[in-house]
Amino acid sequence: MKFQIEDVTVYFPYDYIYPEQYSYMIELKRALDAKGHCLLEMPTGTGKTIALLSLITSYSLSKPQTPIKLIYCTRTVHEMEKTLAELKLLHNYQIKHLGPQARILAIGLSSRKNLCVNPTVLAAENRDSVDAGCRKLTASWVRAMAAENPNVPTCQFFENYERAASAAVLPPGVYTLQDLRVFGKEKGWCPYFLARHMVQFANVVVYSYQYLLDPKVAGIISKEMQKESVVVFDEAHNIDNVCIEALSVSVRRQTLEGATRNLNRISQEIDRFKATDASRLRAEYNRLVEGLALRGNLPITDNWLSNPALPDDILKEAVPGNIRRAEHFLHVLRRLVQYLRGRLDTENVEKESPVSFVASINSHAGIDQKTLKFCYDRLHSLMLTLEITDTDEFLHIQTICDFATLVGTYGRGFSIIIEPFDERMPHIPDPILQLSCHDASLAIKPVFDRFQSVVITSGTLSPIDLYPRLLNFHPVVSRSFTMSLTRDCICPMVLTRGSDQLPVSTKFDMRSDPGVVRNYGKLLLEMVSVVPDGIVCFFVSYSYMDGIINTWNDSGILKEIMQHKLVFIETQDVVETTLALDNYRRACDCGRGAVFFSVARMLVSYRGKVAEGIDFDRHYGRLVIMFGVPFQYTLSKILLARLEYLRDTFQIKEGDFLTFDALRQAAQCVGRVIRSKADYGMMIFADKRLLARAIKGEPEIMGDFLLSSSSELVDECRYSRYDKRSKLPSWILSHLRDVNLNLSTDMALHIAKEFLRKMAQPYEKIGGSGRKTLLSEEDLEKMGDGGMDEMLY
């Protein structure tokens, strides 16, 4: 269909559009017109991706004099491929209506692991090994040797790409990663370097968050992107954590041992070069006296990572004299490794600011702040000089130089935290030194400053007003949309007690109570007896999931569950989890039915694999049970340091952030069950802390959970009067009726039976309530500004 939004003709590749999609496009256009940033929350399964793509590409087509580039960031390769498939459908529709003038170039960009077509390189085990395998065949010095000695192996695909020179281009079209690989094989060109080259010419680029947010990658991949670009961060509910991880570094004893081996190897290489080609080392020294060479002058194959600091914070000066000579730089790194090894030999938890830590390094190891800042660039220069291609073997020393550069660059928004062991396993010595970033706004600030419009969108952004404070920006549009439905296909419930009326919760002093574990088991047992097909259960951590499954097994509950459905379990091994998911789907497909046990939050701050990227639509997920509330581990020193920073810098109270973080994760988990309006599913939040008044806005949600010794933190969470009505997304809250709150197991079972009976009735797409949930082209033409809200909701 084709319709107008003010001065823009929007091309939409379907016959009908959801009202919320139309509203979404209107708000998005407002942000583009204002050339500002926006926050948009749109319910899961309502066509957010196609709405974004349709509006932005149509907006660009309507302004041919000032075309805009779309940079679309996703979390996973799977999401990238789905986005490009939607764009391909849209592009074909636009060409059908507009002809050749609608042609664009859209590409997906991923790592060599996902784009390489050289079977020798692809045989490597992981991404770092694939990168190193590529460099061994394509580095400039390797190709120079191959020109003199034909027996030196090179990559034929890259050589053909280089020989094609300016003729190596992609014709207009939409290219998924598979399309790029096929095109590369047909032409005999390397699809990875071809895609890298075409990024600057493409109208639409789809790639990972890290390509914009991680300075080490963004400095290589995204430096050519023009300011007149619209950046979209899709599924951005955890974008603050992505920003923080991009600027955080962890050092363990294994890291230091590996760094020592790396330094010994580099020392041997220096000695070899002194004996065979000393002029190369002298040339590097002279170059460093004049100032470090610009990265842009290096061949594309010789650059693998950029400086870990943000662009505006990198020193534009010559390298300090004490590390210009290679052997002097190695001596500095050995002293740094020795100092860090000494700091790890501690029996107490230590927390320091970067300023005092740098002062301590200076006094004990004789390394000043400026020298630390240059460590990463100096290492990069040295490895190029020594012609080292197996970069995967040098990850440990790169980590040390990462750490040195960041700790020497930033004095605020970071902490150095040294822990002698994990507090949950105090009997196992495992010291770790962590440079922890607390300020998510640091990594994303260059993106906000550089690009015309940045769109942050997801199905679970509530409470939406917290993101501008966390990311320190001012959106011109901030809006949350509800879902228009012809039937109540979502049934959220809050279960607070078992059939025996004993309360259930995963708060620390209750989670191992036999009564709680038994009631959780009885809840699942009752549900598997009435709910068809697939059921997904989320636990708060792997350790809790393992413990509760073992207890159910010992008590015979698990055996009773398996009489109704097969049981599959997520593990921390990717291969095992993939196999379990595949068999879970097969069990649902054949009618046997299955239960999948997964994790909402992995240890400390890392999310479970399934919670973040796998859909359980249709018969794969008729019920999601959330066993507990996935709060972060509140004794984590890193979390406590971040909470303190957020309170002091952005005036975000500890309780507000912890509640927000837990409920956005819970919403993301339960949102896996609904992926379209024709779908239906139930959601059970099984924890007494999610009482009616807690979700509806009262401050009792967290009081008993916090384990911190700080009574102020506990009191603040218990008595804070901050408006928490929107802690869960509005599209879930709108279906959370009073009768579905404060339930026992038998009450929840009765509601589930009634809900499934209603859902068994024939589904009417249009609906019979007189409320429009599908808009045709004629409907949009008739709609006036005055009747907009009535027609939408």
Image: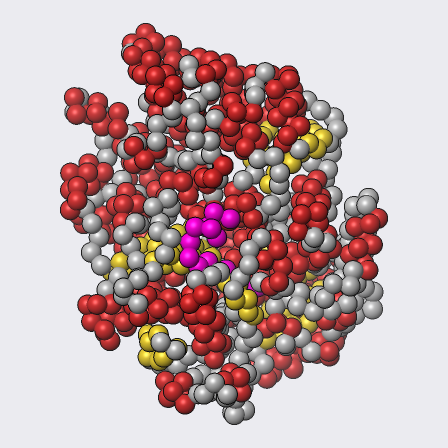
What residue do we see at 26% from left, 69% from top? 92
What residue do we see at 43% from left, 84% from top? 775
Q: Position of residue 647 (x, y in %)?
A: 71, 49
> Who is closer to the viewer here, 121 or 383?
383
Instruction: Judge left or right: residue 162 versus residue 1.
Output: left
What residue do we see at 17% from left, 25% from top? 147
Above or below, 748 against 384 in this view is: below
Give the magenta-colored segment's residue range: 445-460
Instruction: Judge left or right: residue 214 versus residue 109.
Output: right
Q: Position of residue 17 (x, y in %)?
A: 42, 79
> Who is closer to the viewer here, 388 or 120?
388
Quadrant for the C terminus, please: bottom right
Asked if residue 383 shows in the view, the reply is no
The stretch drawn in magenta includes residue 452: yes
The stretch drawn in magenta includes residue 716: no
What residue do we see at 61% from left, 19% from top? 362
Above or below, 208 against 281 in this view is: below
Above or below, 286 against 516 in this view is: above
Q: Position of residue 84 (x, y in %)?
A: 35, 60
Q: Position of residue 48 (x, y in %)?
A: 45, 68
Looking at the rendering, which quadrant does residue 782 occupy?
Answer: bottom left
Asked if residue 778 shows in the view, the reply is yes
Quadrant for the N terminus, please: bottom left
> Who is closer to the viewer here, 466 or 194?
466
